Image (spheres, grey):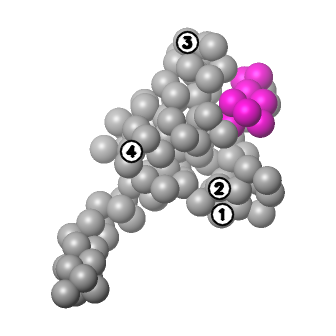
Amino acid sequence: MADEVSRRVIEIIAEQAVLEPADVTMDATLEDLGIDSLGLVESIFAIEEAFDISVPFNANAPGESDFDISSVAAIVAAVEALVAEQKGGAGARPPQADKGRA
């Protein structure tokens, strides 16, 4: 699963940077790749959609966000953690939601 997450995140970042995925290295920063703040926000939205997750990122204060955007590797690691968290909690959430409705 980790390889799939990494591949997809790199594809999303490459698309925003108008690069081939092979040109995106794990140690590159978004700035290195030419991605500006708008491209960052679009990348975050695309990642959320691709993995059905909610990324804890505040575009108004990116330095204060819990989501590490310091490099491609950091983004991949953060997405992997969010995906694992979502899958681990997926079984527990529906019963709680049902109890709240009853």
Determine whether label 4 and label 2 are within 8 Å by CB: no
Query: Which residue type carries mark 3?
Result: Glu
Category of crowding for the residue at label 2, using alpha-carbon neighbours closer than 10 angstroms: few (below 14), some (14–19), many (at least 20): some
Viewer-nearest of labels 1 and 2? 2
Q: Amino acid at mark 4?
A: Phe
Relative placement, left or right, of 2 versus 24 is left
Q: Secondary structure at mark 4?
A: helix
Label 1 secondary element: loop
* Mark 1 touches mark 2? (CB < 8 Å): yes
If you read the primary sequence from the N terminus, does the residue marked by circle 3 or circle 1 appear first? 3
Closer to the chain start, of discs 1 and 4, is 4
Give the residue at mark 1: 66
Mark 4, residue position: 51
Q: Quadrant of residue 83?
A: bottom left
The answer to whether residue 100 is above or below residue 17 is below
83 horizontally vs 92: left or right: right
Q: For the magenta stretch, what is the residue range? A: 33-40
Label disc, if present, on residue 57 of the rendered structure: 2
Image location (x, y in percent) of residue 60: 79, 53
Tag on residue 20? 3
Front label number (4 vs 3): 4
- Indicate which disc, 4 or 2, sits on the residue closer to the N terminus: 4
Q: CA distance from mark 4 to mark 2?
A: 15 Å
For image coordinates 22% across by 73% down, the residue present is 94
Spatial distance from mark 1 to mark 4, Cα to Cα? 18 Å
Q: Are marks 1 and 4 in contact (CB under 8 Å)?
A: no
User: Earlier along the polypeptide chain: callout 1 or callout 2?
Assistant: 2
Tell me the quarter of the picture where residue 50 sits: top left
